[in-house]
């Protein structure tokens, strides 16, 4: 079979699209302002909220689990040192990295909705049993549960991306996608102070796992019943809204054969694509900076404020700002697209704000007076808040490059980026040998700032906003083969 080259594919891209109007009727669009797609995105938002709550709660629970005497002398603790605490925090990602790519593949060929519901159900169960197994078998049992949670929650981002590619029209992509992914910040915002108060209450740290685990179980049951893999599979969506979404995405199937056909994933073309590689670098940079701050900020605040209850509040404040800023940033992104700005320019501008803003803020941490930590909170808030631009920057860019394989791409880039999330807390553990030493923490912040800067620089230079030719690889390949045959017959 003749190999398909990029230049040949460009010539035939127009012929591979379904035969339909390139634009959606304004009347049809107006009649579908609010519909079932918004309910689906709301469910995705709640899923992200609960998923991140399960992750983040451990960042708060780890402090009293290591030494409950700081909050409640009647609650059992395990006497873990800093290295053991970082081991627990990173163990989630050991399982998370293993099932990333399989999750993206399964979501693409089977059902992102069902896979996500099942994965979150199992993750919630493991979270609920955590206090019991910790009491019985201590650190090894906690590590097993955390690895299991990573294995089962790895489907979260690939499934959300797969579902968004089928539910979010391009003109609403930044807003709907940002709203769904803003659940990560909302979950962080909820989990940190709630976990802090629960840990300091008479219920103690075990209640953190009971409450958030139960929420995950309830959500998974609701999503299994009310969620849908696509508009075509939704039980009660209106014909108008379905037509609006499918016309916008140009995904109406012309016959039963095409409807049941599964596209072959273009692995080689994906892995050798410069925009995808730049996207992967940006994702790794984001994970390093984001997870360094997210997992270590409670320990930093506890060592500074000497109050586990208030450390949760202070640690949550930056994520409140990030959550709030995500909405105007997504609106401006869609507005810029509506006014004719290219997708690539919009994504790169949003990502520059999200990466270089925090890089500058973290670089100034060394100037914070050691006896005035209010400025540290201000800088953390700026660094995390501006990172909201990443939601309509590199994160949505997966769908821009390849709507057909957005979930698979997310699983690949997130798999690689998860390795940085594993390494980052371990590096912090090596650098910060004394949690009260501000200068050791400044080294951590300098490293995060440098990685933010370099990651975005590569994304700006090599990133793209257009659909890549291999998105319709099989159709392009078939058309190229037919073209070669026609030439041979003519000769």
Image: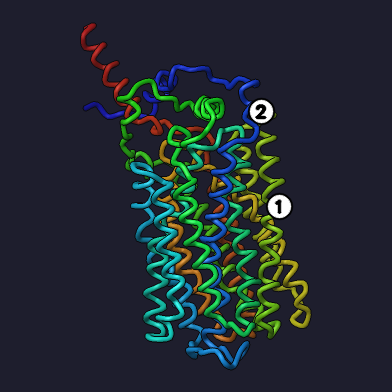
Q: Nearer the N terminus, badge 1 or badge 2? A: 1
Q: Give the image location of residue 485, x and y in percent.
A: 23, 15
**Rendered view: 233 above or below 7:** below
Q: Dot 1, how many residues are within 10 Å of its Cα: few (below 14), some (14-19), or many (20+)?
A: some
**Rendered view: 471 above or below 253:** below
Q: Dot 2, how many residues are within 10 Å of its Cα: few (below 14), some (14-19), or many (20+)?
A: few
Q: Can residue 478 be seen at all in this image of the molecule?
A: yes
Where is the C terminus found, in terms of image quarters?
Answer: top left
**Rendered view: 182 above or below 298:** above
Number of the label disc, if any, that sits on residue 340: 2
Furthest toward the top, the residue is 490
Q: Give the image location of residue 242, x and y in percent.
A: 52, 29
Residue nearest the observer in this picture, 469 or 206 = 206
103 horizontally vs 399: left or right? left
**Rendered view: 211 above or below 224:** below
Q: Residue at x 49, y 52 (%)?
A: 222
The Cα atoms of the two marked residues, 1 and 2, are separated by 23 Å
Q: Give the image location of residue 251, x and y in percent.
A: 45, 28
Q: Which residue is mark 1?
A: 325
187 horizontally vs 399: left or right? right
Q: Residue at x 65, y 83 (%)?
A: 303
Residue nearest the observer in this picture, 41 or 300 = 41
The quadrant holding residue 120 is bottom left
Question: In terms of secondary structure, where does tag 1 sit?
Answer: helix
Q: Are marks 1 and 2 in contact (CB under 8 Å)?
A: no
Where is the N terminus found, in terms of image quarters?
Answer: top left
Q: Give the image location of residue 181, x and y in percent.
A: 57, 51
């Amino acid at each position: 079979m003749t190999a398909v080259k990029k230049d040949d594919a460009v010539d035939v891209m127009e012929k591979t699209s379904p035969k339909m109007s390139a634009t959606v009727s304004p009347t049809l669009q107006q009649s579908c302002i609010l519909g079932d797609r918004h309910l689906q995105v709301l469910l995705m938002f709640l899923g992200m909220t609960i998923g991140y709550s399960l992750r983040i709660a451990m960042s708060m629970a780890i402090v009293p689990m290591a030494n409950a005497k700081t909050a409640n002398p009647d609650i059992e603790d395990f006497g873990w040192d800093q290295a053991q605490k970082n081991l627990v925090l990173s163990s989630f990602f050991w399982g998370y990295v293993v099932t990333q790519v399989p999750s993206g593949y399964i979501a693409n060929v089977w059902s992102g909705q069902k896979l996500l519901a099942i994965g979150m159900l199992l993750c919630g169960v493991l979270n609920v049993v955590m206090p019991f197994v910790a009491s019985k078998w201590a650190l090894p049992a906690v590590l097993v549960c955390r690895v299991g949670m990573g294995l089962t929650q790895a489907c979260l981002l690939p499934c959300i991306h797969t579902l968004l590619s089928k539910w979010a029209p391009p003109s609403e992509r930044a807003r709907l996608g940002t709203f769904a992914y803003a659940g990560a910040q909302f979950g962080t915002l909820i989990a940190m102070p709630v976990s802090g108060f629960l840990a300091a209450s008479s219920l103690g740290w075990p209640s953190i796992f009971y409450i958030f685990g139960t929420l995950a179980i309830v959500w998974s049951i609701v999503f299994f019943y009310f969620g849908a893999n696509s508009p075509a599979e939704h039980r009660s969506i209106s014909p108008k809204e379905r037509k609006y979404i499918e016309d916008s995405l140009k995904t109406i199937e012309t016959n039963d054969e095409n409807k049941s056909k599964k596209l072959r994933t273009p692995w080689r073309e994906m892995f050798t694509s410069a925009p995808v590689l730049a996207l992967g670098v940006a994702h790794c940079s984001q994970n390093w900076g984001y997870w360094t701050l997210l997992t270590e900020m409670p320990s930093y605040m506890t060592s500074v404020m000497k109050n586990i209850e208030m450390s949760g509040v202070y640690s949550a404040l930056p994520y409140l700002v990030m959550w709030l800023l995500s909405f105007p940033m997504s609106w401006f992104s869609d507005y810029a697209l509506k006014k004719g700005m290219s997708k690539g320019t919009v994504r790169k501008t949003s990502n520059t704000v999200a990466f270089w803003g925090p890089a500058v803020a973290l670089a100034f941490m060394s100037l914070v007076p050691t006896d005035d930590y209010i400025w540290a909170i201000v800088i953390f808030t700026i660094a995390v808040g501006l990172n909201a631009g990443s939601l309509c920057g590199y994160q949505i860019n997966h769908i821009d490059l390849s709507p057909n394989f957005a979930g698979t791409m997310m699983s690949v880039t997130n798999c690689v980026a998860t390795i940085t999330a594993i390494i980052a807390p371990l590096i912090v553990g090596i650098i910060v040998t004394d949690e009260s030493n501000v200068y050791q923490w400044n080294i951590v912040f300098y490293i995060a700032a440098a990685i933010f800067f370099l990651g975005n620089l590569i994304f700006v230079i090599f990133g793209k906003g257009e659909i890549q030719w291999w998105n319709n690889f099989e159709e392009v390949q078939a058309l190229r083969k037919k073209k070669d045959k026609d030439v041979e017959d003519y000769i």
